[in-house]
Image: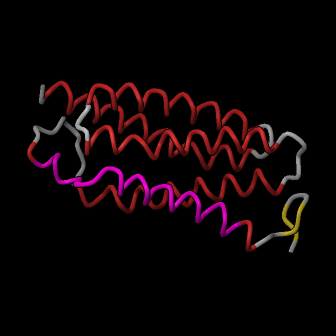
Amino acid sequence: MTIGTKKFSWGAFAFFVGTAVLAGGLGALLGGDFSVVQALIPPPLAPPAWLFFPVWTVLYVAMGIAAYLVWKTGDVDRADSLRVYFLQLAINVLWPLFFFRLEWRLFAFLWILLLIAAVSYTIRRFAAHSTTAAWLLVPYLAWLLFAAYLNLGYYVLNR
């Protein structure tokens, strides 16, 4: 089966999706006990805790698919775009450590702003290779904007 300029590769697809999902799992491990927020005053619009796992799972799968779509284009500069993608993924992995385990809420807010900038740049880079890949990252960016609001809300309400 051919999609774009390269044939579909189950191995590459599994690598990109698996890497994204594993990054989410690593972030969860680094974050430690997510129940620490239950003792905090939540900001308005804070969703129930159970919602985060399915939302993040879908977002990580979409990230992996987007990265796969960029990889399979065969474009000469796709490696640079994928490096930017993996950098934002590394930034993402560290946020739960700062917010949950270390409880550095203000630092975590500044870190998520860095992540938002990195994801915005990744979207721009991906758009040069695949508009579908770029659009697959838009819900992730939207969720990060909401997460930044929550992060700042938890910081302000629980200082």
The secondary structure making up most of the magenta span is helix
Image quadrant of residue 119? top right
Q: How is the image coloured?
A: secondary structure
| 159 relative to 46 in the view: left or right | left
Residue 22 locus on image (x, y percent): 51, 62
Residue 96, percent across and down? 34, 45
Give percent across and percent down for residue 34. Answer: 23, 53
Vertical relation: 22 (above or below) 148: below
Q: Is residue 111 above or below residue 75?
A: above
Quadrant occupied by the C terminus: top left
Residue at the (78%, 54%) spot, across then down: 71
Q: Is residue 37 magenta?
A: yes
Q: Give the position of the N terminus as an image quadrant.
A: bottom right
Give the camera-side residue of 75 and 80. 80
Image point 88% across, 52% down: which residue? Answer: 74
- 121 to the left or right of 56: right
Point out the stretch of residues depicted in magenta: 13-38
Q: Is residue 103 magenta?
A: no
Q: Is residue 35 above or below residue 11?
A: above
